[in-house]
Image (spheres, coloured by chain):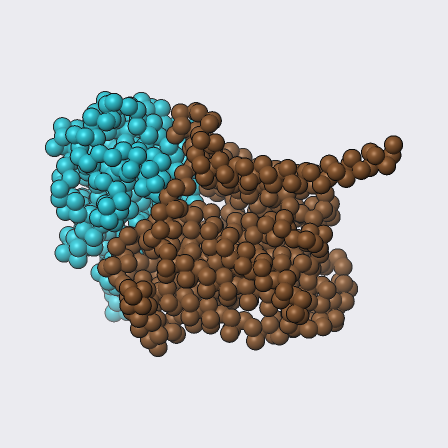
Chain colours: A brown, B cyan
Amino acid sequence: MEFLDHLAIGLETALSLHNLLYAFAGCLLGTLIGVLPGLGPLATIAMLLPFTYGLPPVGALIMLAGIYYGAAYGGSTTAILVNLPGETSSVVTVIDGHQMARKGKAGAALAAAAIGSFFAGCVGVLMLALFAAPLTRFAFKFGPAEYFSLMAVGLVGAVSLASGSVVKSIGMIVFGLLLGLVGIDVASGVTRFTFGFPELWEGIDFIVVAVGIFAFSEIVGSLEQREHRKAYTSEITTLWPTREDIRRMTPAILRGSSIGAFVGILPGAGLSLASFFAYSLERKVSRRPDEFGHGAIEGVAGPESANNAAAQTAFIPTLTLGIPGSATMALMLGAMIIHNIQPGPQVMTSNPDLFWGLIVSMWIGNLMLVILNLPLIGIWVQLLKVPYRVLYPAILMFCCIGVYSVSYSTFDLFMAAGFGVLGYLFHKLACEPAPLMLGFVLGPMLEENFRRALVLSDGDFSVFVTRPISLVLLLIAVALVVFSVLPSLKKQRAVVFTEE
Amino acid sequence: MRLLRIAAALAFAGFANLAVAATDYPTKSVTLVVPFAPGGSNDIVGRYVADRLSKIWGQPVVVENMPGAGSAIGSAHVAKAKPDGYTLLINSVTFTMNAAVQNLPFDPANDFQPVGMIGKVPLVLVVGPALPVKSYDEFMAEAKKRPLKYATSGLGGVNQFGTEVLKKAAGLKMEPVHYKGGSPAMADVIGGHVDLFFSSMTQALPQIRAGLMTGIMVSSEERSPATPDLPTMVEKGLKDAVVNQWWGLFAPAGTPDEIVQKINADLNTIVNSDETKEFLAKDGGTPAPTSVEQFAETVKKETAKWKEIAQEANIKAE
């Protein structure tokens, strides 16, 4: 019954008029920056942090948290409608979401994203409320060897992100891995591929690459072919998913929520990884793998659920331990310190109103978001009818603000422009950018943890197979390779036989 | 004639104005560059000081975060700023360490005028389940038995230097495992993957209090009010291993001495207040008022010391 007491404390805090307003303000702002490509929760929270000085601590945290998970919500909108990810976590939503929009199913895609997000958000909050402590203990079992093996699974799965040629997709992953190497090497302190620019010491930011490769290149690419958009805005048939859609997206939402909730707990893994994993999984288990890349609703529902579940469970290590899993979570901790709350394992007992209030407000926030977003679908779809000459300069401007706000550096803007050109080339060469992004995210983590694991084992490679979690993950990776190679081997054999 | 006299008087007054201009400082808003992202210790201390300075001066002190390349981007910006006292920098002990490991886009010894120290806080040596020792003696016994693995928050950071000076003073064998920041390093010590971490007080205190980590000792001369039962380096006869994490204000080199002295005086008013004592004590820190000369001497001495340690311990980017 302790849980009910906690719930009561939480409800009392979260339902106060002020805190409801803070939650609403946070969610609204989060949705907005989610919709705007480039502008992410990290920069927004960083900019707003000084302004929260004057707010009561619980209210400030409720609002900042709302921005964080609200952004994961809103990111899918731009991905589906305009083919550019509003948030880094919606990079994979672009793949199928926009194809659905082209087929006149923009409304269904948006609804799948919103419903999936709401369900996943609830799952995440529930896990946070019920199992925060045991989940934290589980996350601790992940040492460098386990992280390496998890990243290996991700990397193998990355191949399935592309629907075109496997060779091209591997090429893009490798290129992404190389991009991830830029900066000071964590293990040796050597600067790699920095060309004498201190701006590159800490590596290239995800937002810089994503905005360049997705947003800038999409805009340039669309300017070439002015006509095609009309074609698919006029044929929006229905705003709501059909019964068949719902049947298909339900299991995807369930799977996405579980994967996302799991990845979110691991410090350092991040929301984008959750959606990458979910997309790969959907594609692997689907009976219609050919539809992926051409508007499969599972490809929207799965990843969108995953990133929202992760957005909630990412609070677990932050709240139970005071150890942030990402830069955004580090900012949340900073906000606590500013408000005289010592983050750490005692927050739960020393500030129960804050801990439970925040959790309950997250659930309320999720409810607000779905109420906010479902009726807005009709309005968002109208966005498709806004003429390019108005829409694109606006998007470009917001992208630039977003990129600049990452580290207040004009250098990043030029880099994003460079990636825009690169992205345009990829577009022309029919190379899909999603595998590149995954390589870019995974590469540094893969390398760091690999070397860390070996330093810890004094150079003994067997550490990856003697630790049980690591072994299981590696076996999954091997199985993934075997399952992807087998069908094509069979096909080749079939070809060989017919030729005989 | 009379008109001429008035003109002369006015002109004289004008000159007089110029002469006192330095002590009039500041007559417009001052920028305090925090070379890290918002939310970290430099940012929190920086914003605290900026707020109190603006109250004393009656001019806004605007905090500008310029993160990137450790603290090199923000520091380089201040190094190149006009030396008029209107662009200041807050930086920490790592400022004196960076130069020992990386080629920086500025000269930390000659491009800056140290203004004054704000506060200091010891590091605290913590261990997790991988090294189940409870006291200094147990720790030393174990450390002499086998080479330990210590976590760092990045190559050439204060945690690594702190551990290296301890290693040298106590004659131990330890090997660094590098992480990107203090948080993942802490997580792996708590998870039992790495033996120890010489952590900042801020990060370690909640974990020690919750029993997830064990504090072994602090790196300072005196015991910290936050961990009164942990012994110090000096108590254990390791005087050479004393390290303090500190924060201080810097101005670009060539800033007029009157202005530097004035900022130092006003900074010390803040540092000496009970409010500051309380503010720093929350994370185990203490105020550290210095004169301009004392602070400059500290910066110089530490920069030389870390260069030497880096060479001995072979901490360099290669």
Quadrant in which the C terminus of chain A is drawn: top right
Quarter occupied by residue B7? bottom left
Asked whether, in this view, residue B241 is left or right of residue A80, the answer is left
Asked whether, in this view, residue A481 is left or right of residue B281, the answer is right
Instruction: Give the x, y percent position of residue B3.
Output: 28, 69
Instruction: Give the x, y percent position of residue A214.
Output: 62, 53
Instruction: Give the x, y percent position of residue A178.
Output: 57, 37
Residue at image position (75%, 57%) is: A224
Instruction: Give the x, y percent position of residue A121.
Output: 47, 63
- In the displayed structure, A273 sits above or below A466; it is below
Residue B19 showing in the rendered view: no
- Decide which of A455, B245 is in the foreground and name it: A455
Residue at image position (46%, 55%) is: A261
- Decide which of A419, B162 is in the foreground and name it: B162
Quadrant in which the N terminus of chain A is drawn: bottom left
Residue at image position (28%, 68%) is: A5
- Decide which of A82, B61 is in the foreground and name it: A82
- In the displayed structure, B305 sits above or below A261; it is above
- Decide which of A254, B317 is in the foreground and name it: A254
Residue at image position (33%, 75%) is: A16
Asked whether, in this view, residue B86 is left or right of residue B217, the answer is right
Asked whether, in this view, residue A28 is left or right of residue A419, the answer is left
- In the displayed structure, B166 sits above or below A17; it is above
Residue A12 showing in the rendered view: yes
- In the displayed structure, A253 sits above or below A149; it is below
